[in-house]
Image (spheres, helix red, strand yellow):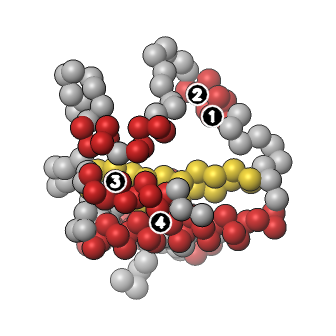
């Protein structure tokens, strides 16, 4: 819930992330218009990757994540009563030969942030599935109860397992777990 004074939270103002406040809209626009506007940041012929992690709203963790960042409801959130911060990486580049460098740099940064947040006890298992990289396991943040529900639904509506084994890409439910 946004504070009534509509000011940025104190933790946010105390970090160096304030320089990243570039996106601000005060007008209403259609979903199509927003998608087209954001699409212009990744023109045809470029390459693009995203990655994500989640931390608790902790000033020290946010400051350390910033330093690393600049270095060369089945989702189990129903019981979460604290604000979370999703740190996302979104990178666009031109050359295919740079794919591994870009992907490994993002992976290394995410792993360092996760390690640092765990040490500060401010990490969180939730991962925003839409922005996860292929090596991440977003369902690891789900409760066993919710994973069981998702598996049951999958088995009921997709008994042959087409979406779990016959479709490339995406994140699959781990039935061996």
Q: Is residue 131 above or below residue 11?
A: below
Mark 3 surroundings: few (<14), some (14-19) or many (≥20) residues within 10 A: many
Query: What residue sits right under mark 3 in the picture?
Result: 62
Q: Nearer the viewer, residue 177 or 57?
A: 57
Q: Identify the residue at horizontal 71%, vertical 42% (top origin).
A: 42
The single residue placed furthest to the top in the displayed view is: 27
Pointers 1 and 3 in contact (C-beta within 8 Å): no
| Distance in Å between CA atoms under marks 2 and 3 | 28 Å
In this view, the residue farthest toward the bottom is 176
Can you identify the residue that label 4 sits on? 110
Which residue lies under the disc numbered 1? 38
| Helix, strand or loop status at disc 3 | helix
In whole angstroms, how far apart are the C-alphas of marks 4 and 3?
13 Å
The residue wearing badge 2 is 34
Residue 83 seen: yes
* Of 73 and 134, the residue lying toward us: 134
Q: Secondary structure at mark 2?
A: helix
Give the x, y percent position of residue 97.
81, 67
Q: Does label 2 or label 3 sit earlier along the sequence?
A: 2
Residue 32 visible to the viewer: no
Give yes or no for contact between labels 2 and 1 (Cβ–Cβ under 8 Å): yes
State which quarter of the image contains the N terminus: top left
């Amino acid at each position: 819930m946004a504070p009534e004074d509509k000011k940025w939270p104190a933790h946010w103002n105390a970090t160096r992330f304030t320089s990243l406040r570039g996106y601000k809209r005060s007008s209403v626009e259609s979903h199509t218009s927003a998608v087209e506007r954001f699409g212009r940041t990744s023109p045809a012929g470029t390459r693009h990757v995203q990655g994500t992690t989640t931390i608790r709203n902790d000033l020290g963790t946010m400051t350390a994540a910033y330093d690393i960042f600049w270095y060369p409801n089945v989702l189990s959130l129903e019981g979460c009563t604290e604000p979370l911060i999703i740190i996302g990486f979104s990178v666009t580049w031109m050359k295919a030969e740079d794919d591994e460098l870009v992907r490994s740099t993002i992976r290394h940064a995410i792993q360092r942030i996760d390690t640092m947040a765990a040490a500060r006890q401010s990490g969180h298992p939730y991962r925003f599935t839409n922005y996860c990289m292929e090596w991440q396991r977003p369902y690891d943040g789900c409760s066993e109860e919710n994973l069981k529900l998702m598996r049951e639904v999958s088995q009921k509506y997709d008994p042959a397992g087409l979406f779990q084994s016959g479709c490339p890409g995406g994140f699959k439910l781990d039935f061996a777990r």
